[in-house]
Image (cartoon, grey):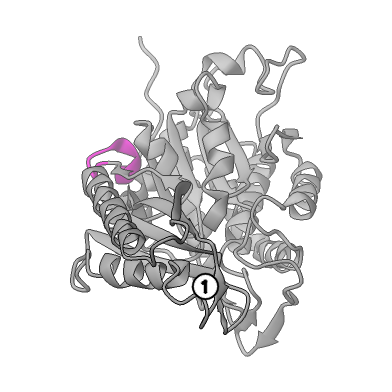
Amino acid sequence: MPPEPPPSEPDQIAQHPAVARALRILRETDDITVADQLELVRIPAPSLAEEQRAARFAERCRSIGLTAVRRDEVGNVLATAAGHGRRMNTDGVDDVAAAIPPVVVAAHLDTVFPPGTDLTPRRSGNRYLAPGIGDNARGLAALLALGRALVGSGVATVHPVWLVATVGEEGMGDLAGVKHLLRDGSYWRRALAFIAVDGTGVRRIVNRAIGSRRLRIALTGPGGHSWADWGTVNPIHVLGQVVAEVSRLVSPHQSVSTLNVGRISGGTSVNTIPAEAWLELDLRSEAAAALADLEVQAREVIDRVAGEADRSRRPGTAGLGVQIEVVGDRPAGQTTSSSTLVKAACAATRFIGETPELVASSTDANVPIALGIPAIALGAGGSSGGAHTEGEWYENESGVAGLERLLLTVLAVAGVARPGAAQ
């Protein structure tokens, strides 16, 4: 007689003795989860400079009993609740486990805040205030809570569950950590499912990846005196016209695509024609084809405006140099609402008494979605505001509910062995 399939509905999963213990651990250790969040938010972690926070996160992984804890070549921290043998492959996975596709649960280590930012958390009523307290100290604390529940309960999963704290998710980090994790030929590229834990909340399920292309446009000219050399091509003037024209490529009422000039700089003094200037342009869309078309239009504007300026410069003066560099590339795509993973997340959301909301965002899940790996992003419970500002805050109402949703979603796709089943 074939073995019974593992339970897949949240109410069935929650009745499993080990899962019931895991849910109880989440509730009983909620103070520890918040303490982890408050400790980790204090540690600086600018994108691609996350060493201090990564080291402390790895220490906490070991202290709660996770195994195979290590940092990979780019700085991601990896850990699992499963036991491992001695023969490890190049991804740090034992030969037996490597034959089974994993479920990856990831949270990013980095923040948008530069070195020197005051990260000290403070309390105001029921709120904790600190830059990065929600995005993504909460996600990291949730990974530790999940690991603590899996280890403490002894729940056995059919597919191994790996917890990964990634580097370079924010801004110019350009998803560096998850891109390396899911590189061609890696064990993780075979993931059965990928869940990014990012920020807060208990209803939203990110199943649509907002893609982005980020361009750095640098212009150079001969420079000169603002009076004596008038008529020499001025890179800032040209960039000003570029900004004016590209801003009209996307309607303010359009929701599929957006465009933003986030930084611009150049020049040395008010009475000097600048010899160089640059700007950074962020193009976004839910649709890969729309994003590609928007980039083509933006490049056409840049080429045309620069060409017109070059042709109209004062005779005998040097021309304009134009360099366009891609400094960010986040793929778009979606995990369909009919996928097992999205259905599991929706069911877990309803189990905790909330209504699921399928939404679009840009997270670590972009990369696996684009690779065809079922992937979503979930908030880690609680509520927050002021993300990416120094006034960011977190409130722990429904914090445990978000952790329960995460656990039940993970176990629904990883599979829970029935009591007494052979392992």
Residue drawn at point x = 38 percent, y = 63 percent: 315
Is residue 99 one of those drawn in magenta? Answer: no
What residue sits right under mark 1 in the picture?
Answer: 387
Q: Is residue 352 at least partly visible in the picture?
A: yes
Q: In this view, does 210 lie above or below 278?
A: above
Q: Is residue 108 above or below residue 156?
A: below
User: Does 96 sit left or right of 280 as displayed?
Assistant: right
Q: In which quarter of the image is the N terminus?
A: top left
Residue sitting nearer the eye, 184 or 318: 318
Residue projecting furthest to the top: 1
User: In the rendered structure, which amino acid carries the disc numbered 1?
Assistant: Ala
Residue sitting nearer the eye, 393 or 246: 246
In x, y percent, where is residue 136? 59, 61
In x, y percent, where is residue 410? 47, 42
Q: In which quarter of the image is the C terminus?
A: top right
Residue drawn at point x = 72 percent, y = 38 percent: 66
- Report the magenta residues as a range: 336-343
Q: Is residue 273 at least partly visible in the picture?
A: no
Q: How many dots with numbers?
A: 1
In x, y percent, where is residue 71? 73, 36
Residue drawn at point x = 57 percent, y = 33 percent: 180
Is residue 341 one of those drawn in magenta? Answer: yes
In x, y percent, where is residue 277? 52, 65
Residue drawn at point x = 29 percent, y = 63 percent: 258
| Quarter of the view holding residue 340 | top left
Crowdedness near tag 1: few (<14), some (14–19) or many (≥20) residues, C-alpha within 10 Å: some
Mark 1: which secondary structure? loop
